[in-house]
Amino acid sequence: MALNFVRLGVNVDHIATIRNARGGKQPDPVLGAWEAIKAGADGITAHLREDRRHINDDDLNRLQLLCSSENIPLNMEMAATKEMLDIALILKPKSICIVPERRQERTTEGGLDVLSKFNVLSPIIHELNKNGSRVSLFIEAKDEQITAASRTDAKVVEFHTGSYAKAVEVGDATLIDNIVTEFKRAASLADQLGLEVHFGHGLNYDNVETIATIPQCTELNIGHFIIGEAISSGLGTAVNEMRTLIDNARVGL
């Protein structure tokens, strides 16, 4: 289902990364989330990792309070573990995105292997759905992963855009065209199977518009670039500029 409006979810993880580099309470990711909401963010995303390298439990609880008070969805990113399931069942965020997680990685790299982990993921997704959270699966744009996702209770797939972002960065036009073609085909398949389609990872001012023009795209989750851009231009300005680029990309669709 093609929608003319694409939601912008702003990930505030790396505000916490800056805070944790020195310790203490500043900068506060919850204050950053509030600034993002005022500037036009349609949702806030935060990844509670097992090692708490950026967002911590208190951040997540306060983000949930903020988002609830502003009627804005909190999208909790989490690994498929018992610890995270227990936290999510208590927190009850509006949205949950299940992601792969490895301690040695700097950030989430690659998509979740839903096919091989189907029996682990299915009961977790079922419990989260029963608890009132809408579940998304962060995957590669591959047929087998999309089909496996559709067999779970998940309502959303978020396609990993890391390889696309790298192709744009190095200026490989052929690779860019191939990846975008794959995204369009995958988005169409997901839509046919009844899944809502999101995209995220490595998106910035230079590459976001192409992704935003994919008809089935309903949400983009962007964090690292916006937080980095905020250092020079201000968080509100960075969010507003991203919001404008996404909206302009949808004109005429």
Image (cartoon, rainbow, N blue to C red):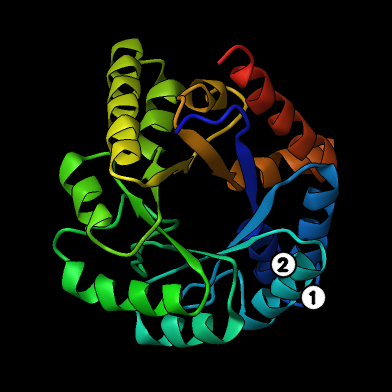
Vertical comparison of 185 with 108: above or below: above
Above or below, 147 against 101 in this view is above
Q: Position of residue 106 (x, y in %)?
A: 44, 58
Residue shown at 56%/22% (left/top)? 209
| Structural crowding at the residue carrying mark 2, measured as other residues with C-alpha within 10 Å and reported as few (<14), some (14–19) or many (≥20) | some
Q: In which quarter of the image is residue 249?
A: top right
Q: Residue at x 48, y 27 (%)?
A: 211
Amino acid tagged 2 = Arg
Instruction: Tell me which residue sits at (46%, 25%) in the image.
Output: 215
In the image, residue 66 above or below residue 236: below
Residue 28 visible in this rendered orientation of the protein: no
At a point 69% along the width and 82% down the height, the residue shown is 58
Residue under pointer 1: 25
On the image, the x and y values in percent for residue 155 come to 40, 56
Q: What is the three-letter code of the residue carrying label 1?
A: Lys
Is disc 2 placed on a helix, strand or loop? helix
Q: Please state the total of marks drawn on the protein image.
A: 2
Query: Is residue 61 left or right of 128 when viewed as pictured?
Result: right
In the rendered view, does 147 fall on the left or right side of 163? left
Residue 130 visible (yes or no): yes
Relative to 141, say whether 108 is above or below.
Answer: below
Q: In which quarter of the image is the C terminus?
A: top right
Gap in Å between the C-alphas at discs 2 and 1?
Answer: 7 Å
Disc nearer the start of the sequence (2/1) = 2
Q: Which residue position holds label 2?
A: 19
